[in-house]
Amino acid sequence: MRELVPDVYRAFLEFDQKAFKDGAIPSKTKELIALGIAQITQCPWCIDAHTKKAATAGASDAEIAETTFVAMAMAAGAAWSHGGLALQCLQEHKG
């Protein structure tokens, strides 16, 4: 992709670097957030990259493990809320 659309690729890299810089949210926390999102979206490359970046930014093994549990809780919450939607659809189907 870099070779096909170099301007867009460079713009994305610049955006990505700015998004993960220290700001109101420290970069370590941003990497942990990205790791949790990567786990939810099931992106192996993203999990690898953001685990390493979080560790480089100072995240401990325990922080990375807790991030996994937060992602698990979010996934469970989504399944629970979709379960409610399924029951609502069932009630509508039964009329």
Image: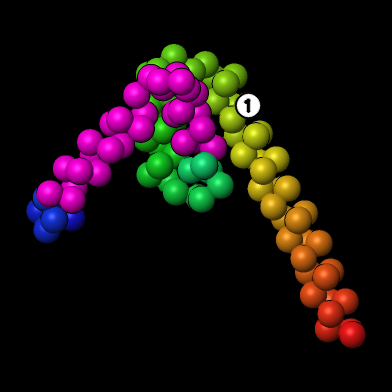
Query: Residue 8, position in %: x, y?
Result: 18, 50
Query: Residue 81, position in %: x, y?
Result: 76, 56
Residue indicated by mark 1 = 66
| Residue 55 visible at all | no
Q: Which part of the image, by quadrant, shows the N terminus?
A: bottom left
Is 49 situated above or below 55? below
**Residue occupying the point 84% across, 69% down:** 87
Identity of the amino acid at label 1? Glu
| Residue 22 left/right relative to 78 | left
Question: Residue 5 versus residue 40: which sits nearer the camera?
Answer: 5
Q: Principal SS element in the magenta part? A: helix
**Residue occupying the point 81% across, 62% down:** 84
Question: Residue 29 versus residue 47: which sits nearer the camera?
Answer: 29
Q: Which part of the image, by quadrant, shows the C terminus?
A: bottom right
Query: Residue 41, position in %: x, y?
Result: 51, 50
Query: Residue 76, position in %: x, y?
Result: 72, 48
| Residue 74 left/right relative to 35 | right
| Residue 64 left/right relative to 13 | right
- Membership of 71 in magenta stretch: no
**Residue occupying the point 65% across, 34% down:** 70
- The stretch of residues the image draws in magenta is 7-36
Using the rendered view, name the quadrant where residue 73 is placed.
Answer: top right
